[in-house]
Image (cartoon, rainbow, N blue to C red):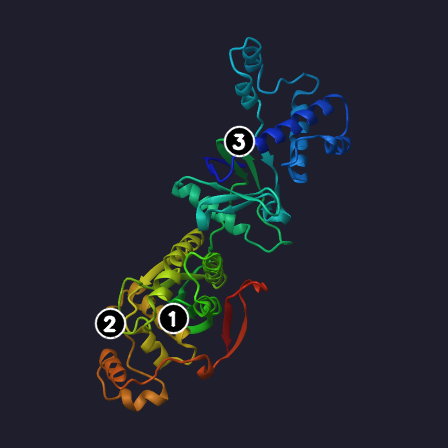
Amino acid sequence: MKTIKLPYKSSKDLTSIIKQYSCVVRYGYNRFFEGKMEKEIRYLTKSLRNINLLNSWLVQCAIKDAKAVHKRFKDEKVIFGGKKNFILRCKNKISKEEYQLKRLIPINIQGEELNQGNRLFKLNIIENNQIIFKLNRNEHIELKLPNLRNNIKNELFKLQQLNEVKTGKKGYTYSIKLDLKYIYISFEEFKNERCKNLNENRYLGIDLNPDTIGISILDNGNVIHAQEFSLKPIFNKILNEKLSSNSDRMKYFQNKLKFETFQISKSIANLAKQFNCKSVFIEDLHFKGHDSKIKISNRKNKNLWKRELFINNLNKRLNVEGIKLYSVNPAYSSFIGNLQHDYIDAVNASIEIARRGFEYRIKKNKKGFYPALLVKHQWKEMAAKFKDWKEFFLNVKNLKLKYRVSLNECLYKFNVFKQNSSHKSMVLNYVFYG
C-alpha cells in the first residue's frame, strides 16, 4: 500500500464537515465501548443532531473508523485529541476553540471497485490538477493540488485513468483521508502496467481543426483505422445563437467544449493504447503553411478552439502509457492527403501527418518529408505537369479548384454515433470502414 500526502486548497471551508464527522466517530466509539454492535450503532446515529452535512456513506465510514479505534485500544479508554492536549485544556493553557480543532479526526473514505475507485472522491488530475469531493448530488467541492513532482503526477494520472470507466465496471480502489491541511491518497502500488507490446511500425496521425479532429492509424503505411470527431453541433449552436462572451449560455457552451475536448483526448489515447501504437504524430500548430487551415473567423479560432488544452491533455495521457507524441510540420498535408486518399478531409490530412511523421521523425528519412507525386485518378493528368507538390498546390489554388473531400464524396462506409454514448453529448463520432 502506498500513500501520497499533499497540501490542498478547498473551494469551501471543510471545518464544519470534519467536525461533524469527528462527532460521529467519537459517538460510535463510545457505543462500541458500551458493547453495542455496529448495526445497532448505525441505527442510533440516525437520532444524532447537527450532522446534517454528512451523507449516509460519510456516517458509515465514521462508524468504521470508530470500530477500528475500539479494536485497537480494546478496553482502554481513549481521549480524543490526546492526553497532553486534554491536560493543557484543563489548565486553561489552550482555548476551547484550539482544543476542539486538535480533537478533529480526519475524514477517512474507503475505496470501492464498483464506484470508480472511490464513492465520494473523483480524481481530476489530468484535466485540472484537482480532486473533486462529491459531498452530495448537488454539491461538489474542488480540492486544488499544488504543482506535483513528475513521479507523483504520473502515478495519479495512472490512478485516474484506471478509474475512468463506466459505472458498473470495476475501478482501481483508492482511499482518501482528509484533514484541514492535507489530503492522503492511499492505493496499492502499480505493477509495471505500461503497454509492453507497442508496435514500432504502428502509429497514429492527428489533423486538428477548430471544429473537427481527424485521426488515422497506420501499420507499415497501411490505414487500419480512420475516425473523425466533429464538434460542429456545438460550434453551430454558439454561432447561430450569436451569444455574448459573458452570457450564462455561452459559459455553459465553453464548459461543454472543454469537457468534450477532454473526452476526445481520452478516446484518442485509448485508441493508441488499444492498437499498440508506439508513436502519435500531430501537426505543429505554430507552423503557418499555405494550406494549413481554411480561413476562419477570429472568434471561432481564438475564442472557441481548445487546441492547447487538447494537446496538453493528450500528451499527459500518452505519457502514462509510454507512447510518444511528436509534432510534425504540416506544410501541404491537407492538399496531399486529399489528393491521395478517399476518406473525409480531416482523416485524409491525418494520414499524411502520420506518414510524414514516421518517415521524417522516426526513420530520419529527410527525403521522406513529401511523398512521391502520385495522386488519385481524376488528378493524374494535371499532376503530371508539375515537378513537386508545392508547385502543384499553387496552380490548383490559383485556379480555385476544390480538392477537399466532403462526407458526401467519401468512398468509404462509416458509422456515426454520439461521443460517450450520452444523449447530452454534442460531438458526432464518425468511424470509417470498408
Going by the numbered disc 3, the residue's amino acid type is: Asp
Q: Which mark is residue 367?
A: 2
Q: Residue at x 47, y 71 (%)?
A: 227
Tell me, for residue 179, which label it has, or none: 3
Rendered position, 380 above or below 194: below
Q: Is residue 239 visible?
A: yes
Residue 11 in the image: state x and y as whole percent: 49, 40
What is the number of the mark on residue 350? 1
**Amino acid bearing label 2:** Lys
Q: Residues within 10 Å of mark 2 (few under 14, many from 20)?
A: few
Q: Secondary structure at mark 1?
A: helix
Question: Callout 1: 10 Å neighbours few (<14), some, many (20+)?
Answer: many
In this orientation, which residue lies closer to the viewer: 93 or 172? 93
Q: Position of residue 433 (x, y in %)?
A: 51, 76
Distance (Cα) linking label 2 and label 3: 60 Å
Q: Residue at x 58, y 10 (%)?
A: 90
Q: Of discs 2 and 3, which sits in the foreground?
A: 3
